[in-house]
Image: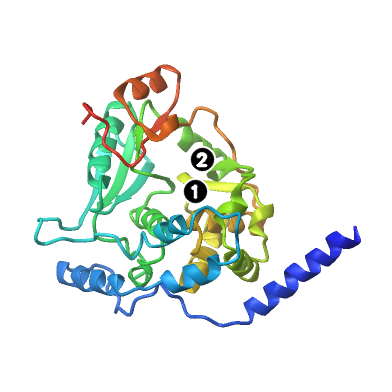
Amino acid sequence: MVKILLNRIAFYLVFCFIGNLVQANPFQIDFSCPSTLSNEEYINVQKELRKINIEPLVKKWYEGHPNLVPLQDFYNRCSTGKNQILIDEEKGFFPIQKLEKIGRGGSSCIVTYASYNGFYPHFLRSFLKELKASGFNGYILYRLGGFPNPTGQDIQYAGVPYSFKIPMMLEAKNLGFEKVLWLDCAVIPLQNIQFLFDYIDREGALLYGGRFTEAANYLLSETRYKLIQMTGIDVLEADYISARAFGLNMNSEQSKHFILDYYRLLKEGLSFFSCFPEEFVFSALVKKHSYSWFPRYYQKLFYVGEGGQDTIERMCAAKEAGYFFYYRHKQIIEGYD
């Protein structure tokens, strides 16, 4: 018992020391913020994003942590924001934002985002195709390229990894939607997902997750200390929130507090240095507020094929087994479009 107490004291002493070190947000770019950006402005934003250099900080924070996943994994995940392709004039890739009615429409809105990197444009197209065939009635708000900027400030933080999810949800709220569900465009809808919106309506939020026993392998100690400083929560003692699917009643007081706190961490930036940047932030914030929300693990919400190989056969088998989504491994499924 004494040893445990001493370890906790040492932990918080280190945390207090690090918390007193003031450091600017390394992801933030210097850019004036109109709410709607022109193509020329996106080109300038992208140039500024490419100037972001986080490699020294990632290496420094990684040193001396033998149990972590490889350094390159941390660097790749933390670099997703600065490496986004928002626009590519030479290839004819320009920002697209669209609100599209699905089925009979309704009060439910799905939001998603795809940069022009890799397979994401293909993922978005096939996501839309399968959503329309699923029997869902509602709307989808999506972006291909560009970046959501509902507050007029978000674009400054486009370099923060995976920072587009909450701003996309706010854009839907600004269009009048109350029940909003973020879905990664890497998923393929296999059947009608109306029950997820029913859950949001009933519980106020949809949190997919639970205990994550290996979380410490994906989280830098300095990020853990920073989250304690910013939220008062040791995220390794919180339930883990996956952001593949994340839904909120955007008009509830709990959601408003959550979003305000999220933007406070977004502006600080350092809380996002991990292999799962936005998910550790979400996890800390949910525990901080002791919401009536609670994470729930739906056994058949996502099918993730073992071995990282996607096939039509696996997708069909997942549908027959009653799964709602097939989660792709950053690849195009041969023979499927």
Where residue 170 appears, as percent x and y from the top left, is: 40, 57
Q: Which label number is shown at residue 249? A: 1
Residue 193 placement: quadrant: top left
- The number of callouts visible is 2
- Tell me which residue sits at (38%, 44%) in the image: 184
Asked whether the residues under the numbered discs 2 and 1 touch, taking CB atoms below 8 Å apart as contact, a structural biologist would say yes
Q: Secondary structure at mark 2?
A: helix
Q: Circle 2 is placed at which residue position?
A: 201
Where residue 27 appears, as percent x and y from the top left, is: 40, 72
- Tell me which residue sits at (49%, 35%) in the image: 198
Where residue 274 appears, as percent x and y from the top left, is: 51, 59
* Residue 103 appears in the rendering: no
Residue 148 placement: quadrant: bottom left
Q: Is residue 199 above or below residue 87?
A: above
- Amino acid carrying label 2: it is Asp
> Which is nearer the eye, 19 or 324?
19
- Amino acid carrying label 1: it is Asn
Q: Is residue 299 above or below residue 209?
A: above
